[in-house]
Image: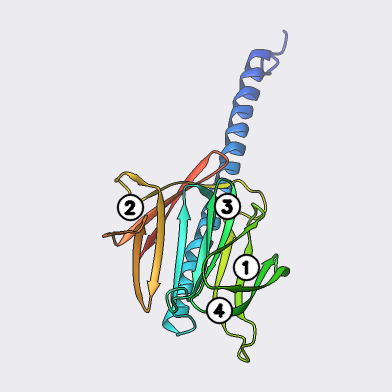
Amino acid sequence: MKKKILAFTMIELLVVVSIISIISITSINWFFNFLQDKELKTKTITILNYIWELDKKIKNNSIYDYDIKFSSSINDAYLIYENIYDNDQYVKLFYNNNLWSLILSWLNWEMWNLLIYKWNKLKIKEDLIINSYNNIIIEDEYDYKFLSVLSWSTNNTNLNSIDLIKFDKESNKLKLLKISNSIWWTDIWNLEIKNIWWKKEFYNSWSILNQNEVYLYFENTWLENYLKITK
C-alpha cells in the first residue's frame, strides 16, 4: 500500500507567494507614504513655530512688529519683515518677473549701509545715500537676510530687517499650492500676517480678512497637507 504524500501543489504555492508579494508591496508603499506624510507635516509645523516665535518676540518687546507674506507667485518661500511699522523709513523686498527687487526708502539725506547675507555670510555691502526709491536686483534664490544700518550711528541701529526663507532647503520639493481664508471657502492669492504691538491681523492684497484663522495648503511630491494659522 502506497503512502500519501502531503504537499502543496504548484498552483497553491503560486497563490500563496502572490498573496505574500501583494501584502509586502502594499505594506512598503504604506510605510513610505507614512514617512513622507510625517515629513511634510514636520516641515509645515516649522513654519507655524516660526510665527509663534515672532509672537513671543512681540510680547517680550524684542521687536515692535512683524509682517509675514505668503504669495502664490513665490510658492517655495516666504518673506518676514521686522520692525517695519515702527518707522516711516523702511526697506522692502518685492518679487516681479523672476527678479527680486530690494526697495529702500527714507526721508532724509542720510548714509546707510545695506548688508545682504546668504547662508549667514555677508554677500553684499553697499553705502547708499537715498531720499527716494532705489532698486537692487539680487539673484533669484532664497534664505537671504537683509539689514540696513545707519552708517555713522554709534548704536549701529537697524532700520529694519528682512528674512527670505525657503520652505524646504534640502530637497526643494515642498510647494505652497494655495491659500484659503477658510477650509471651505474659495482660495486667495496672497496672505499677509501682521502683528503690531500684540494686534494680529490677516490681509489679502491690502484688504483685511475678518477671519480668526487661515489655511496654507502644501504639496510634497504627491502628498498634500494644510497648515492652519490662527490669531
Residue found 72% across the figure and 70% down from its top? 122
Element at label 2: loop
State the mark number for residue 109. Answer: 4
Instruction: Give the vertical position of 199 relative to 19 (above or below).
Output: below
In which quarter of the view is residue 102 placed?
bottom right
Q: Nearer the viewer, mark 3 or mark 2?
A: 2
Q: Quadrant of the N terminus?
A: top right
Q: Nearer the viewer, residue 220 or 145?
A: 145
Can you identify the residue that label 2 sits on? Answer: 181
Can you identify the residue that label 1 sits on? Answer: 145
Q: Position of residue 67 (x, y in %)?
A: 45, 67
* Nearer-N-terminus badge (3/1): 3
Element at label 1: strand
* Nearer-N-terminus badge (3/4): 3
Say whether residue 120 is left or right of residue 230. right
Tag 3–tag 2 contact (CB < 8 Å): no
In which quarter of the view is residue 29 placed?
top right
Element at label 3: helix
Can you identify the residue that label 3 sits on? Answer: 39
Q: Which amino acid is tagged 1? A: Lys
Q: Which amino acid is tagged 4? A: Trp
Q: Residues within 10 Å of mark 4 (few under 14, many from 20)?
A: few
Q: Which amino acid is tagged 2? A: Asn
* Nearer-N-terminus badge (2/4): 4
Q: Nearer the viewer, residue 76 or 155?
A: 155
Q: Position of residue 168 (x, y in %)?
A: 61, 54
Q: Residues within 10 Å of mark 2 (few under 14, many from 20)?
A: many
Q: Residue furthest top?
A: 1
Count of numbered tags: 4
Instruction: Give the vertical position of 226 relative to 212 (above or below).
Output: above
Q: CA distance from mark 1 to mark 4?
A: 25 Å
